[in-house]
Every structure is written in C-alpha cells, then in structure tokens.
Image: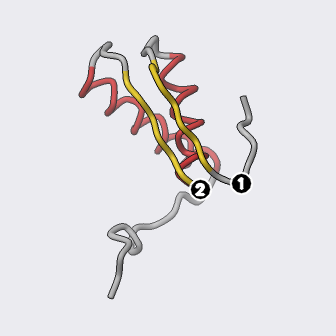
C-alpha cells in the first residue's frame, strides 16, 4: 500500500531545479487565484515548501493573508 501519490516522481537534482519547481508552483497559484489573497499551511517538510512559496508569492505582489507553518526547522525569513 502506498500513501504517497508522488513517490515515483524524480526529485530535483539541483538547487536550480528545486527553485524552478517552486517558481512553477507559485506561478500556478497566481494563475489560478490572480491577485486574490491566499492562505498557506504547511507541516514538517511542507512548512519548508510554504516558507519558500510565501517569499515567491510576496515577490509577485500576492497578498498572503495567513501562513501557518509547523515543523522542526526555524523559518528562514
């Protein structure tokens, strides 16, 4: 039984590929929501993803109304 639907996907091989994936995700959020304020929530590794998404969305002028991160790492911002 597999609970991770993306387990077979290749992981980014470099920081540049990782950044490109995050930029594509931020662009998809902007394309879907326009300039509508958004809320982010991340737990564990998702918290790290959300902190990066937060920075990218804010740099594109998107208002992030709420951001909840729960995990073991400190927020880098």
For image coordinates 58% across by 26% down, the residue present is 55
For image coordinates 40% across by 68% down, the residue present is 9
Quadrant for the N terminus, please. Answer: bottom left
Q: Earlier in the sequence, mark 1 or mark 2?
A: 2
Given residues 27 and 54, the one toward you in this image is 54
For image coordinates 51% across by 34% down, the residue present is 53
Q: Please say if 69 is above or below 6.
A: above
Label 1 – label 2 distance at C-alpha:
7 Å
Q: Please say if 45 is above or below 50.
A: below
Q: Please say if 9 is above or below 52.
A: below
Given residues 6 and 3, the one toward you in this image is 3
Given residues 21 and 58, the one toward you in this image is 58
Quarter residue 52 falls in: top right
For image coordinates 51% across by 63% down, the residue present is 11
Q: Which residue is mark 1?
A: 72
- Element type at marker 2? loop
| Disc 1: CA contacts within 10 A as few (<14), some (14-19) or many (>=20) | few
Query: In the image, residue 45 lies at what x, y percent?
Result: 58, 55
Query: In the image, residue 28 lies at what x, y percent?
Result: 32, 33
Contact between labelled residues 2 and 1, with CB atoms less than 8 Å apart:
yes
């Amino acid at each position: 039984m597999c609970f991770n639907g993306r387990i077979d996907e290749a992981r980014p091989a470099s920081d540049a590929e990782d950044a490109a994936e995050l930029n594509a995700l931020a662009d998809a959020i902007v394309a879907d929501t326009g300039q509508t304020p958004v809320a982010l929530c991340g737990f564990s590794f998702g918290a790290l993803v959300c902190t990066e998404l937060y920075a990218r969305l804010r740099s594109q002028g998107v208002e992030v109304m709420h951001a909840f991160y729960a995990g073991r790492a400190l927020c880098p911002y």
